[in-house]
């Protein structure tokens, strides 16, 4: 259950100019996930711009394309999907999103949307033309279309008001929402009885595992949490001689690319030179933010403390 739920995609819905595409792209980068923009996909598959589709083929044709592109996007795993503002008009799309995604709605006030549209059309080198917002009175148009869609945007699991936030701040809010809305999958109701508790901070949460023999399940547990890529084991040499083989076998067996960085045992190692050596090791091995650091504290070598295992997880 934990594994399946953790793989729910994140889909951004919301009115034009709320930042769905930019935010989705950045969040995908932070999480090391894929990114799909349904409007871009429609343009790519049809070979036409969105205004051309509306003009030559009509809105119905656009909505059909949007439907099939969304279906394909929702079939993928670990992707952030940015949708067009009208995707929620189709009840089947709403059903699909609720079933397959953590849905985050990016909100903005009508005036904010209007100002952003003006900037997009008047001051941008590559203005985006929104066929539904090209009338004589865009402010009224935005107000009317937005209020008619508001009940559908309400399918969202999490809402972010973007009016006073930068793109990066919106990204943080999306990730925070994703953690909050998924935390029920990481609590004691899950079938994972090895989870002793879930630690929650303002922006994230993580499980603490306690149990005998867990080291051999290390790779599996990390996979279940949605982690992948490189696993960097950092340890002092004497701890590594006790736990190195079991941990690296477990990680390797679960598909992680394992790299080990050991430092001499003892207090004398706690200095800036050793810290720099570790950073150099990470750089030489091209470790990215979505890779995982597995750190064995010195106490791990103490038989009285042998359940103690620290996992260094990615920043989000
Ligand atoms: C639409 C919004 C547009 C685009 C199309 C229709 C809508 O996307 O999908 O012009 O119905 O609101 P953005 O939300 O990215 O502007």
Image (tube, grey):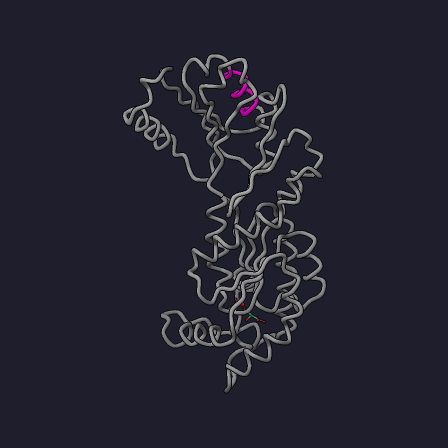
Name the image quarter holding the N terminus.
Answer: top right
313 or 280: nearer the viewer:
313
Task: Name the quadrant containing residue 222.
Answer: top right
**Quarter holding ligand 1:** bottom right
- Residue 191 in percent (x, y) is at 71, 34
Q: Is residue 45 visible?
A: no
Q: Is residue 144 visible?
A: yes
In the rendered image, the vertical position of residue 30 relative to residue 264, given as above or below: below
Residue positioned most to the front: 304
In the rendered image, the vertical position of residue 175 relative to residue 312, given as above or below: below
The residue shown at (57%, 22%) is 250
Q: Is residue 247 magenta?
A: yes
- Give the extent of the magenta segment: 243-252
The residue shown at (70%, 53%) is 99
- Residue 80 is left or right of residue 72, and the answer is left
Task: Name the quadrant containing residue 14.
Answer: bottom right
- Residue 314 in percent (x, y) is at 48, 38
In the rendered image, the vertical position of residue 64 relative to residue 201, given as above or below: below
- Residue 166 is left or right of residue 180, and the answer is left
- Magenta stretch: dominant secondary structure: helix
- Residue 270 is left or right of residue 96, and the answer is left
- Residue 222 is left or right of residue 4, and the answer is left
208 or 276: nearer the viewer:
208
């Amino acid at each position: 259950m934990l594994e399946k739920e953790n793989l729910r995609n994140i889909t951004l819905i919301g009115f034009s100019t709320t930042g769905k595409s930019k935010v989705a792209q950045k969040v995908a980068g932070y999480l090391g996930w894929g990114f799909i923009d349904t409007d871009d996909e429609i343009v790519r598959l049809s070979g036409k711009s969105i205004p051309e589709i509306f003009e030559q083929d009509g809105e119905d044709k656009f909505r059909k394309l949007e439907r099939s592109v969304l279906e394909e996007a929702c079939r993928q795993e670990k992707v952030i999907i940015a949708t067009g503002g009208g995707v929620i008009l189709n009840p089947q799309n709403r059903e699909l999103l609720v079933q397959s995604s953590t849905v985050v709605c990016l909100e903005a006030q009508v005036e904010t949307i209007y100002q952003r549209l003006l900037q997009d059309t008047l001051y941008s080198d590559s203005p985006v033309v929104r066929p539904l917002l090209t009338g004589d009175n865009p402010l009224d148009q935005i107000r009317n279309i937005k209020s008619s869609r508001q009940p559908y945007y309400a399918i969202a699991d999490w809402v972010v008001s973007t009016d006073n936030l930068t793109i990066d701040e919106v990204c943080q809010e999306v990730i925070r929402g994703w953690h909050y809305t998924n935390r029920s999958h990481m609590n004691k109701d899950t079938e994972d009885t090895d989870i002793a508790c879930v630690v929650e901070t303002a922006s994230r949460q993580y499980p603490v595992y306690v149990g005998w023999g867990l080291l051999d399940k290390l790779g599996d547990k990390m996979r279940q949490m949605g982690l992948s890529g490189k696993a960097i084991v950092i340890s002092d040499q004497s701890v590594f001689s006790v736990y190195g083989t079991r941990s690296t076998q477990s990680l390797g067996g679960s598909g992680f690319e394992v790299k080990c960085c050991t430092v001499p045992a003892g207090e004398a190692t706690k200095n800036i030179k050793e810290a720099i050596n570790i950073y150099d090791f990470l750089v030489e091995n091209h470790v990215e933010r979505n890779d995982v650091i597995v750190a064995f504290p010195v106490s791990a070598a103490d038989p009285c403390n042998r359940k103690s295992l620290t996992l260094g997880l990615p920043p989000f």
